[in-house]
Image (cartoon, coloured by chain):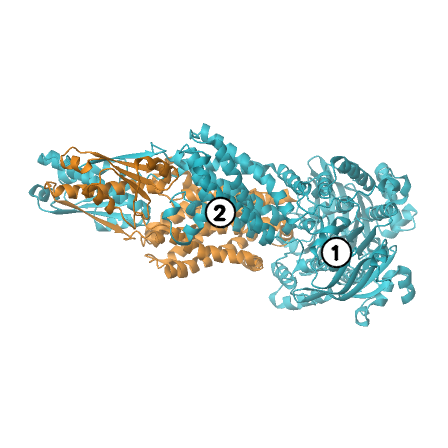
Chain colours: A cyan, B orange
């Protein structure tokens, strides 16, 4: 190990690395030098820091303490990270975490190809080569979300390999992948390594048998390194034959205790049938996922379900739990027909689904307690039950941890513990041990065996581990929705004349599906025969396109990705485009500023012709609608309180007489002040009406014309002479909709990647923050512009609101404005972590300012306080000015240019802020 | 028995997930405190600070009298402009009104020739345009009449109009604005919280887990309804107590308890609506759009921003099915007019019916949407 020239011998060097998540210490003072050009394995139980180490080396996670040097540079320096990240490929833990489920296989690959600057021809070649080599070529059009687990992992690998990395980092790549696919996966890696001998590969794995074939191993435990060396060296050092044994020998004394080999006592046949299925069939459209499956499982039996990914195991289990109603056939649990509404049976069943499905917002202990309570475990028994399970599944050290902070294996254990919390009589476990380390797996199996043999718990389990399948009393082999064989594991091996269960399994697959299976086996076992040879894979190493500035190609890659996702979700598109038109229609017609049809009633205590004449004066007005007369004050009070009356008039007794005599008399008017604006208008109307009545009365009754003489006021309503609501509202509604809808769409686009995990691509690919954000923003800008054109069209045609001024000016203003509104959405999603928070922020950040502070109803100049300040700088204000100017006032750019500046400024500021606040590494 | 406890547990779980999202908590706190305050104080007090321009071509004592009658707080000090500047100023939105007093105005008035003053109104300025023009007419005519009366006596009948404004005598806008803002928040937040809670469970696969447990969809829904409703209700009471009555000094006429009871009922409706919408939407972006589509009309047309009776009949009828319409009307009656149960029972009845319809619709649609996502 020459430290002087590390580039030759080591690909990464770590010195004094420590990492903390809150109070938990994940890595403790690690010093490690990883040799170059080798296949390096990280082995160890769950939660010892394997993933954290890989994330640090890949640059996805921020270095807290110590030094990480990768490919000859310091990973703490952003410059270096940016320089080397095209040379590093990182595949995170979890099935298809870096993939986009709505996009097809092809689109996912193209997306990554574009990120690394490949042109169309180059992309085509690489995609074809990689997918042919992995057997994905036939599925190029299938959405990634619909692939089976094994295929997802292969696709993840293809995406990682598309740019010829010098260093490939794989975090538990074969977890949850069936044995066949797993062998294929590794032989593919072998071929790639042959083709590119210089490439270093780092793999974290919990499968010890896989690790046997690696060149160099790092054994880890509790955030420290136990030993390093080749598998052979480790065997020699510990004097053991298998790696699993070697690892256990390396563990500190106190951890070894409690581990013993699993022994399964023979199953004593019973009569009780726990599960029975007859002709169980499930069709999704014209695809048959499960095809007439029959089985009978006895009480206390351990029944294994084997089969490749996507063979229908999960679907069958879901039908048994009642989650999916079968298309055909029937199933019984404990003699009861499976019925989704049967609560009593559910209490007797424990189910663990394949995907992690616990509450990530509840701690480990809270999850257990919640489930215990929902299953009505007696309150007094809960604490002991929970602590027992925590201890048994090795979770007693982390009761307060959030599941998201836990490694995959520990999350799996938690899911198991949850499925067991109510001591069910039947356990339905869908690949419960995927990603769980060997020691914990054995402990878990021991637990299952005890449950089955002592407590007569029936266990229905699916697995990819052959040694687990061998422990079952009986197994079923499933393929393509059908059960190929069902018997005791030993019988199956015997029947096929095979040496191992795995051999028998593959033999059955060959019988069932000769062409497909053969092709699969071929690629896995005979490397050079596959359509793609090693030489093909040795692509000419293209110089990495290293943009130091802004790369349009990478930004565009995100644009396309976003566009594709939008196109695959037509409902969203339709809602965004036509929803806004509907809103415009509703609000354009509905909102009126003209106050009329106000209800009033009269309390006429006089009942003379004169008093009736006064009341008549009001009812003739278009502003007022008369309600039945008031009888007394109590009536007046009640009807005003209920909001029925906006105005009540009281005419006193002797009114007619007093007017005739010339005695001063007073008419009372009560106005409902609950809505101040309406009340003000009413005040004005009443006063006006009173005046005109006075004039009228003077003229008709006393023959005096008092209206002559003074002056008159000619009021001209400019821009909207007929005072119609639509021409006034439409230019104001458009800005409101162009703010809220684009902001909402773009807000969810970023935070969604955070919540669902694909944000990792920002961390580990060469894309910069500005490319990421602007790339994502672009499709929403286009969508918003389209939306604007549609709304304008609707305004001109259906609403008959003409565009009087320069449309080009409005178009330019709209462009700047939607850059702001989509930018505001991005801003909302940079600092929030959940979609719900981003959504809420986008709403409160747009709705109130747009409706109240932007001058839609009250001009900004007459607002007060903070609202006025917001209104002055808020772009909607200026856009409304421009929109009204162009629509109603026939103005052009020269008249409105002053409003462009603040809008442009705001758009730039919000974009800058978003870019500055977005993180390029996980903290 | 276990039913009630399941609903309780499921609700507690929702509360925990909210607690674990500190940014969301901050946003909720902001929307019920600062935002209410800002929205309430931003509303101009009646007609206030109206920008107006005067073209005085007469320059007489009468025209000066008119000019000085238009003063703060209702009006900004009038800007004196020339006839040629008027159009540009209106175009740029510098002022909402321009008053044009023609040459020889005073002489013509006194001579009984009844000259005309021209009032130009920027009709795009909605509310100010309508309330303001009436107001200006009155002021101007009043000034002229008074001026004239010094020369001639009046013979109008001695009938006086005593105007009394009930419930908010000074027509303080903050009273109205603050409460309407709270009501808007209540609706928005409860729909977002309840609906998003369901979509999140679907996107994270946890709903599947719930459905294999001895828990019914009805319990799952009720768990979300009570917990999210409670959060909003607490925020509302806090805001009412400390922001509206405290910081803004708004007197509340009626019973706060009755208001909160109606708010609880309203929350039942809106959370059910949120869940119903979440069962329609297949992912969060769709849900986000759906919220805007539903919330905007509900907010603008429920009578919380402009009077309902002035809207077109079609809009009024359509809004009868929106819970906000009834909630706004009941809330205004209780809080401003001190109405009791005897007055607001029709609204309570309407809310109950709408709530049940949405709840049942959501429940029916709930199972369907789950098999869709599988």
Q: Residue furthest bottom?
A: A254
Q: Is residue A485 above or below residue B25?
A: above
User: For the residue carrying disc 2, how many other residues have a C-alpha within 10 Å: few (<14), some (14-19), or many (20+)?
Assistant: many
Residue A450 left/right relative to A627: right
Marked residue chain, label 1: A
Q: Quadrant of residue A19?
A: bottom right
Q: Quadrant of residue B83?
A: top left
Residue A750 lies, in percent from the top left, at 61, 48
Residue A458 circle label: 1
Residue A903 left/right relative to A86: left
Please report the residue visible at 49 percent of the width from the left and 43 percent of the height from the top: A901
Residue A344 lies, in percent from the top left, at 63, 54
Residue A396 lies, in percent from the top left, at 70, 67
Residue labelled with disc 2: A846
Q: Is residue B150 above or below residue A364?
A: above
Mark 1 vs mark 2, foreground winner is 2
SS under mark 2? helix
SS under mark 1? strand
Q: Work out whether residue A253 or residue A224 is closer to the camera in this orientation and state it.
A: A224
């Amino acid at each position: 190990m020459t430290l002087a020239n590390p580039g030759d011998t080591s690909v990464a060097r770590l010195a004094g690395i420590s990492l903390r998540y809150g109070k938990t210490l994940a890595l403790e003072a690690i010093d490690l030098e990883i040799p170059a050009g080798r296949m390096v394995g990280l082995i160890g139980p769950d939660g010892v820091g394997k993933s954290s180490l890989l994330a640090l080396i890949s640059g996805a996670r921020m270095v807290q303490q110590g030094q990480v040097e990768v490919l000859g540079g310091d990973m703490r320096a952003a410059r270096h990270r940016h320089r080397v990240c095209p040379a590093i490929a990182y595949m995170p833990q979890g099935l298809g975490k870096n993939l986009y489920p709505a996009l097809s296989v092809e689109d996912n690959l193209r997306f990554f190809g574009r990120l690394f600057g490949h042109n169309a021809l180059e992309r085509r070649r690489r995609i074809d080569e990689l997918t042919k080599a992995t057997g994905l070529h036939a599925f190029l059009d299938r959405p990634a979300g619909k692939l089976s687990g094994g295929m997802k992992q292969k696709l993840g690998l293809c995406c990682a390999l598309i740019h010829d990395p010098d260093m490939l980092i794989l975090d538990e790549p074969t977890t949850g992948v069936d044995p066949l696919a797993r062998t294929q996966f590794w032989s593919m890696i072998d071929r790639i390594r042959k083709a590119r001998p210089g490439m270093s590969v780092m793999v974290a794995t919990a499968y010890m048998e896989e690790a046997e074939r690696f060149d160099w191993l790092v054994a880890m435990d509790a955030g420290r390194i136990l030993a390093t060396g080749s598998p052979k060296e480790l065997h020699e050092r510990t004097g053991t034959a298998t790696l699993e044994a070697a690892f256990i020998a390396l563990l500190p004394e106190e951890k070894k205790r409690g581990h013993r080999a699993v022994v399964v006592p023979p199953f004593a046949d019973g009569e009780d049938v726990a599960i029975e299925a007859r002709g169980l069939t499930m069709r999704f459209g014209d695809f048959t996922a499960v095809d007439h499956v029959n089985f009978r499982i006895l009480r206390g039996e351990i029944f294994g379900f084997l089969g490749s990914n996507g063979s229908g195991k999960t679907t069958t289990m879901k039908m048994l739990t009642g989650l999916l109603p079968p298309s055909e056939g029937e199933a019984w649990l404990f003699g009861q027909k499976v019925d989704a509404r049967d609560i009593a049976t559910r209490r007797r069943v424990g189910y663990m689904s394949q995907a992690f499905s616990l509450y990530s917002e509840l701690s480990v202990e809270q999850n257990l307690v919640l489930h215990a309570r929902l299953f009505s475990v007696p309150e007094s028994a809960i604490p002991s039950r929970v602590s027992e399970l925590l201890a048994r599944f090795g979770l007693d050290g982390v009761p307060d941890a959030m599941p998201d902070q836990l490694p995959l294996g520990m999350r799996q254990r938690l899911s198991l513990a949850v499925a067991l919390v109510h001591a069910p009589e039947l356990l339905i476990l869908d690949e419960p041990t995927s990603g769980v380390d060997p020691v914990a797996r054995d402990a878990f199996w021991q637990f299952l065996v005890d449950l089955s043999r002592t407590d007569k718990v029936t266990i229905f389990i699916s697995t990819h581990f052959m040694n687990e399948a061998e422990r079952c009393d009986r197994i079923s082999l499933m393929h393509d929705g059908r059960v190929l064989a069902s018997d005791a594991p030993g019988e199956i091996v015997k029947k096929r004349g095979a040496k191992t269960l795995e051999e028998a399994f593959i033999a059955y697959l060959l019988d069932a599906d000769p062409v497909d299976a053969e092709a699969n086996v071929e690629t896995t076992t005979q490397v050079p025969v596959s359509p793609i040879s090693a030489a093909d894979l040795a692509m000419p190493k293209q110089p990495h396109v290293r943009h130091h500035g802004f790369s349009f190609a990478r930004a565009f890659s995100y644009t396309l990705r976003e566009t594709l996702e939008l196109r695959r979700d037509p409902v969203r598109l339709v809602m965004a485009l036509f929803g806004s038109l509907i809103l415009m229609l509703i609000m354009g017609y509905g909102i009126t500023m003209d106050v009329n049809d106000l209800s009033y009633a009269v309390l006429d205590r006089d009942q003379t012709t004169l008093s009736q004449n006064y009341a008549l004066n009001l009812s003739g007005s278009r502003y007022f609608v008369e309600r039945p007369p008031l009888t007394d004050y109590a009536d007046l009070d009640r009807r005003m309180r209920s909001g029925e009356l906006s105005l009540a008039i009281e005419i006193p007794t002797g009114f007619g007489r007093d007017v005739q005599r010339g005695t001063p008399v007073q008419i009372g008017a009560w106005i409902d002040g609950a809505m101040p604006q309406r009340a003000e208008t009413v005040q004005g109307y009443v006063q006006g009406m009173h005046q005109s009545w006075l004039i009228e009365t003077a003229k008709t009754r006393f023959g005096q014309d008092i209206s002559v003489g003074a002056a008159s006021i000619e009021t001209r309503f400019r821009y909207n002479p007929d005072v119609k609501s639509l021409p006034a509202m439409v230019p104001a509604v458009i800005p409101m909709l162009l703010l809220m809808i684009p902001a909402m769409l773009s807000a969810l686009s970023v935070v969604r990647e955070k919540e669902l995990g694909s944000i990792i691509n920002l961390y580990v690919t060469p894309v910069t923050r500005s490319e990421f954000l602007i790339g994502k923003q672009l499709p929403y800008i286009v969508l918003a512009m389209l939306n604007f054109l549609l709304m304008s069209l609707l305004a001109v045609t259906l609403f008959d609101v003409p565009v009087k001024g320069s449309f080009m000016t409005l178009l330019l203003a709209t462009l700047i404005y939607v850059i702001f509104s989509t930018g505001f959405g991005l801003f909302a999603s940079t600092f929030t972590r959940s979609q719900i928070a981003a959504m809420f922020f986008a709403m409160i950040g747009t709705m109130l300012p747009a409706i109240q502070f932007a001058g839609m109803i009250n001009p900004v100049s007459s607002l007060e306080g903070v609202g006025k300040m917001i209104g002055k700088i808020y772009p909607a204000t200026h856009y409304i000015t421009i929109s009204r100017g162009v629509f109603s006032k026939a103005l052009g750019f020269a008249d409105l240019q002053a409003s462009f500046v603040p809008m442009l400024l705001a758009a730039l500021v919000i974009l800058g802020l978003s870019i500055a606040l977005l993180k390029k590494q996980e903290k | 028995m276990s039913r009630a406890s399941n609903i309780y547990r499921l609700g507690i779980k929702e509360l925990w997930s909210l607690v674990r999202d500190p940014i969301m908590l901050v946003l909720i706190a902001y929307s019920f405190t600062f935002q209410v305050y800002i929205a309430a104080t931003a509303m101009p007090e009646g007609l206030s600070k109206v920008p107006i321009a005067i073209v005085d071509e007469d320059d007489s004592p009468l025209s000066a009298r008119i000019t000085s009658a238009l003063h703060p707080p209702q009006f900004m000090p009038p800007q004196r402009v020339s006839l040629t500047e008027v159009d540009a100023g209106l175009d740029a939105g510098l002022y909402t009104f321009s008053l044009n007093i023609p040459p020889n105005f005073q002489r013509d008035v006194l001579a009984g020739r009844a000259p005309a003053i021209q009032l130009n109104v920027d009709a795009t300025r909605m509310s100010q345009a309508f309330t303001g023009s009436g107001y200006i007419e009155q002021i101007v005519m009043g000034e002229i009449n008074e001026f004239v009366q010094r020369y001639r006596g009046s013979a109008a009948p001695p009938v006086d109009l005593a105007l009394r404004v009930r419930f908010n005598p000074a027509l303080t806008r903050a009273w109205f604005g603050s409460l309407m803002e709270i009501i808007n928040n209540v609706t928005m937040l409860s729909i977002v919280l309840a609906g998003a809670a369901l979509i999140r469970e679907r996107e994270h696969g946890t709903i599947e887990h719930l459905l294999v447990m001895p828990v019914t969809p009805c319990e799952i829904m009720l768990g979300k309804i009570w917990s999210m409703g409670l959060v909003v209700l607490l925020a509302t009471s806090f805001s009412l107590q400390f922001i509206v009555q405290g910081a803004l000094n708004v007197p509340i006429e009626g019973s706060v308890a009755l208001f909160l009871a109606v708010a609880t009922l309203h929350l039942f409706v809106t959370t059910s609506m949120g869940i119903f919408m979440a069962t329609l939407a297949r992912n969060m972006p769709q849900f986000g759009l759906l919220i805007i589509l539903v919330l905007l009309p509900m907010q603008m047309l429920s009578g919380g921003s402009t009077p309902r009776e002035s809207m077109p009949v079609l809009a009024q009828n359509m809004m009868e099915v929106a819970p906000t319409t009834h909630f706004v009307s009941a809330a205004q009656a209780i809080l401003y007019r001190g109405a009791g149960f005897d007055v607001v029972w029709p609204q309570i009845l309407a809310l109950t019916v709408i709530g049940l319809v949405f709840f049942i619709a959501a429940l029916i649609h709930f199972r369907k949407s789950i098999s869709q996502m599988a």
